[in-house]
Image: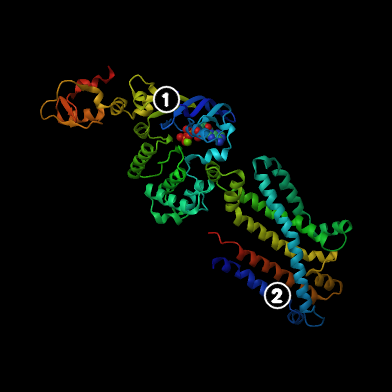
Amino acid sequence: MIAQPVIAIEGVTVRFGTTDALRDVTLHVKAGEFCALVGPSGSGKSTLMRLVNRLVVPSAGQVRVRGQDVATLPAPALRRSIGYAMQSVGLFPHRTVAENIGTVPRLLGWDAPRIARRVEELLALLRLDPAMGVRLPRALSGGQAQRVGIARALAADPDILLMDEPFGAVDPITRRELRAETRRIHAETGKTILLVTHDPEEALELASHVVVLRDGRIEADGAPADLVAPDAAPFVRELLGGGQPGLRWLSLLPARGALDPRPAPVGAAMLARNASLADALSVLAESGDEALGMEGEKGSVRAEGILGARR
Amino acid sequence: MKRFRRGVPALLLALGLAVLAMPEVAAWLMGGTQGPYPAARLLDLALDHAALSLAGVLPAGLLGLVLGVVVTRPGGRGLRPAADAAAAVAQAVPPIVVVALAVPAFGFGWAPTILALMLYGIMPVLRATVGALEAVPPETRLAAEAVGLSPRQVLQEVELALAWPLVLDGLRVALVLAVATTAVGALAGAATLGTPIVIGLQNQNQVLVLQGAAATAALAFLADALLLMAVPARD
Ligand SMILES: Nc1ncnc2c1ncn2[C@@H]1O[C@H](COP(=O)(O)OP(=O)(O)OP(=O)(O)O)[C@@H](O)[C@H]1O
Ligand SMILES: [Mg+2]
């Protein structure tokens, strides 16, 4: 049996008045995939994401979640089963941090001690001070509020998580931590994650599947390395390439793929097994050697092998 | 504690006016030539007056609240101009006219006054409710929908919860207006603090006019103070 996509968007057009926010978009996300949506401002990323929990209704086409047409499901139940960290955060200003986080569990009828335990767990997971639970949202910094928003999305342990620019307002260090945390959550729980980000590095680094939107259409849809490969569309390479698409491409390809049967010279620098071609290039540049070894491998990684990735 | 302090000025004013309404004080102020209204009967009238005010303002408040909610729902938005216009017209008609016109239809007693109070009280509550519901940030409403609150839960748990202090402010305005307006009911034969005023005017007894007016104002400020204390302070 072919695995059903957990999210299937089929030929969807979304019209707001006279503008089309999405035009004939088709996208399949498989269970457990980490899918990043990137594209210029106004290209339809948030709209595409909101189709999944039916905050946006298609003008044409169909949206299926877990195999069911969302138009046939009761919206509140559908939404409680999907975590959503909003672009504008949207915490309830009259509810404390703990109450905000516990919203969906409460709607699902969990008992109070279980909700309290879960809130405590999530505060720790998102590196928020446990004492923060009693605060009102207006007493939080932008980055703290954003983390509370993520905690609220995670609260009932949904199998699908929608995150719309969730790390926008945090400092670079916390951002990196949260990114790593998100990666860990994905690896450990196998949730299907849809992430909107303006940071191409974030998209390429976290996602197993990257979707590029432009003017309401899907411009590209595939594995990260394929989207910055030399034969990818120029718009996509420019958007994701960060000025050096070639290097970014190499950073997404494993060095192991370029292993040469010739042994590495004695004393050559050693690469980790999960090093990328960009890592290998960097070490070569620094060491001045012509070949590198790799831990646990007999062969070597050579400059001509790295640069031959195109071939 | 903060909420109690908010009501103190109005409470003091009510107290001062109540002293002014006392028979001895009013008679002394007016030169003491005419007989004042006895304190015990004035108190009876004040209780009737308060009851009549509530009988008018409660349905008005409820109606204003319900109308305010209806015209801010997606399905009821079309009713908004009509509701606004009706509420404005209702407020523009002087209560004394409503009472006078209602007597032939409803007879003497409470009914004409209740009608006037309802017409008069809807607008402040409707305005406050609509304004407060529209002031709920759109992203808060969107978040409420997004986490899976039903439309009724969005209204109760988020929109009204956030709008409540402003709605109560509107209710307070309506109540104070109602207490002041109830005096007119005396013209339709209802026993209110307007009764001494009417008698005083008929008999050219200024003491009674002063007593009725001061007692009415005292009751209005008392109502204001009580509601101010009942509403949680906003910061
Ligand atoms: N509720 C709405 N009503 C009318 N137009 C809308 C609505 N939501 C989105 N749009 C329009 O649809 C288009 C796509 O919007 P969307 O929010 O999906 O963009 P985005 O890619 O998320 O942008 P950003 O990166 O700035 O968040 C924009 O032109 C926007 O103005
Ligand atoms: Mg967006």
Image quadrant holding the N terminus of chain B, namely bottom right
Which marked residue is nearer to the observer: mark 1 or mark 2? Answer: 1
In which image quadrant can residue B190 be found?
Answer: bottom right
Kind of residue sitting beneath label 2: Ala
User: Where residue A5 appears, x then y in whole percent?
Assistant: 46, 28
For residue A310, the mark is none
Q: Which residue is mark 2?
A: B18
Label 1 neighbour load within 10 Å: few <14, some 14-19, many 20+: some
In which image quadrant can residue B226 be found?
Answer: bottom right
Q: Residue furthest front?
A: A1
User: Where residue A236 appears, x then y in whole percent?
Assistant: 39, 25
Residue at 76 percent of width and 52 percent of height: B90
Coloring applied to the structure: rainbow
* Distance from mark 2 CB to nearest ligand 1 atom below 8 Å: no
Q: Chain of mark 1?
A: A
Res. A293 in view: yes
Tell me the SS state at disc 2.
Answer: helix
Q: Is A103 situated left or right of B76 in this image?
A: left
Q: Chain of mark 2?
A: B
Gap in angstroms between the C-alphas marked 1 and 2 = 78 Å
Q: Which residue is mark 1?
A: A221
Kind of residue sitting beneath label 1: Asp
Label 2 neighbour load within 10 Å: few <14, some 14-19, many 20+: some
Tell me the SS state at disc 1.
Answer: strand
Q: Is B98 situated left or right of B61 in this image?
A: right
The foreground one among A125 and A226 is A125
